[in-house]
Amino acid sequence: METIKGRGAVSGAASARFNLPAREADGDWLDDAETVDGPGRHAQTTVTEEHPRSILSFNTSPDIGFDRSVNAYRGCEHGCIYCFARPIHAYHDLSPGLDFETKLFAKPAAAKLLRETLAKPSYKPAPIAMGTNTDPYQPIETRYRITRDVLELCLEVGHPVTITTKSDRVLRDLDLLEQLAARNLVHVGISVTSLDPVLSQKLEPRAASPAKRMAALGRLAQAGVPAHVSVAPVIPAITDHFLEAVLEEAAALGVFSATWIIVRLPHEVAPLFREWLDAHFPDRAGKVMATIRSMRGGRDNDPEFFTRMRPQGVWADLFRRRFRVAATRLGMTGPRIELDCAQFRRPSLDGQLSLL
């Protein structure tokens, strides 16, 4: 199967959900790809500015460790083939495949909208999660600096925030992160899937290399910013053999907080992932999917609360045991970091803080 240089998805088939029709050539941009990008199979990245009425999203999921989040972008240029956020693009009549990583949306007024929410008398502070849907430090953050705007607001009003990313661009905001960390207002997690740059280029074609992510973890830890390594996702027979090595390298850099997550394949992600396996690992595609299904009750994905985040079966038990043994040996079993909500001071809409 032919792949597309610099992209994770092999195709851009439209979603069958929401009664959306299948589209030829994945939309107008691909029809004109050779005119825009030159000969060969390429995919141009476009960014549309979005102006929502609010920016803070709340959830009541019983198996997620946060209840609110800010997503500065929709779609993600990193192109991680396993990304569970891909199906959201289908809701907007865009492909969860190539469109997800090429047709991006930015929300430049995010900090202004967040200020309006935080200023409401009814607002009660709790850590705001960034990077829970798409990466807050994907390449277009360099131009838009939306994540930085949100961090500046959190520092101003004393609001706790957590960050999850696959990019060493997080270090561009190290000045803010150090100040937030000094006040126990921030926690940064970087996910590392493998230590092999060739494999990473296939899995996450436009994300930072594993070496850069590890170096970023070390810089954060050295600067006193609470840093966390997430071995995520663990993909059986593709990345699982890096589990212990990632923990060992992170621990050597002074990172002593770690988790792991098995790959999840909701909705359109499963067929996209199977296409990717056939293109890059045809010799083991069947084994990979059989192992995943054995952990998900015989399905490609388990959407149920609680069990969706806790795979079952002998393979899941093996990965869980391997992680626990390595984390214990390396001293990476510290208590969960609790950020401080007591410093929050409600802002006024003119940019001044309330005295009460």
Image (cartoon, grey):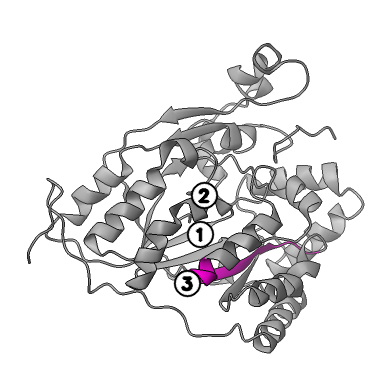
What residue type is disc 1 on?
Thr
Report the Cα–Cα distance between label 1 and label 2. 7 Å
Q: Is residue 229 magenta?
A: yes
Q: Amino acid at mark 3?
A: Pro
- Residue 351 in the figure: left or right of residue 140: left
Q: Which residue is mark 2?
A: 135
Mark toward the start of the polypeptide (3 vs 1):
1
Label number found at residue 345: none
Circle 1 SS class: strand
- Segment tinted magenta in the rendering: 220-236
Where residue 126 appears, as percent x and y from the top left, is 30, 68
Callout 2 secondary element = loop
Are circles 1 and 2 on residues that touch, CB within 8 Å? yes
User: At which x and y percent is residue 169?
Assistant: 53, 50
* Left or right side of 190 for 192: right
Q: Which residue is mark 1?
A: 164
* Residue 170 seen from this side: yes
Residue closest to the eye, 18 or 308: 308
Left or right side of 52 for 216: right
Q: Earlier in the sequence, mark 1 or mark 2?
A: 2
Q: Residue at x 51, y 59 (%)?
A: 164
Mark whose residue sits in front, 3 or 2: 3
- Which residue lies under the disc numbered 3? 226
In terms of depth relative to the viewer, which is nearer, 14 or 6?
A: 6
> Can you tell which quarter of the image residue 231 is in?
bottom right
Cα distance, mark 3 to mark 2? 19 Å
Q: Residue at x 23, y 74 (%)?
A: 342
Asked if the magenta segment contains residue 206, the reply would be no
Identify the residue at image location x=52%, y=40%.
Answer: 75
